[in-house]
Amino acid sequence: MAIIVNLDVMMATRKMSLNQLSEIVNITLANLSKLKTGKVKAIRFSTLEAVCKALECQPGDLLEFVED
């Protein structure tokens, strides 16, 4: 099983750069980049909430479950 992070898709849809999102959400560029590439093992609800608020989306728009 795998959780796919669709942050890049949502950012492209909203025409927002990683730098812009980093400033709005107040998360380091490095941590946001790791989230975008799916190289994280966990995400805090507060971070997820901030990203969803900035991108005006739902958590399900960012995270997708895919069975192996």
Image: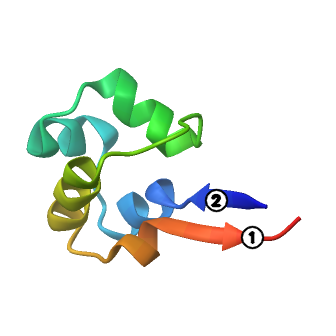
What amino acid is found at the position of numbered circle 1 in the picture? Answer: Val
Where disc 1 sits, the SS reads strand
Question: Taking 22 as reference, is 62 above or below it?
Answer: below
What amino acid is found at the position of numbered circle 2 in the picture? Answer: Ile
**What residue appears at the point 21 percent right and 37 percent down from the top-left corner?**
22
Residue 12, percent from left and from top: 41, 61
Q: Mark 1 points at which residue?
A: 66
N-terminal label among 2 and 1: 2
**Chosen colour scheme:** rainbow
**What residue appears at the point 43 percent right and 32 percent down from the top-left corner?**
33
Q: Rate crowding at label 1 as few (under 14), some (14 to 19) or many (20 or more) other CA atoms within 10 Å.
A: few
Question: Taking 5 as reference, is 14 above or below it?
Answer: below
Q: Relative to 17, is 21 on the left or the right?
A: left
Q: Mark 2 points at which residue?
A: 3
Q: Write down the quadrant of residue 28 in the picture.
A: top left
Q: Relative to 48, is 64 on the left or the right?
A: right
Q: Relative to 29, is 24 on the left or the right?
A: left
- On-image quarter of the C terminus: bottom right
**What residue appears at the point 44 percent right and 66 percent down from the top-left corner?**
62
Q: Nearer the viewer, residue 50 or 19?
A: 50
Residue 27, percent from left and from top: 21, 32
Q: Write down the quadrant of residue 16 in the picture.
A: bottom left
**What residue appears at the point 37 percent right and 22 percent down from the top-left corner?**
30
Residue contact between numbered discs 2 and 1, judged by CB atoms under 8 Å: yes
Residue 61, percent from left and from top: 43, 75
- On-image quarter of the N terminus: bottom right
Where disc 2 sits, the SS reads strand
Q: Rate crowding at label 2 as few (under 14), some (14 to 19) or many (20 or more) other CA atoms within 10 Å.
A: few
- Picture disc at residue 58: none
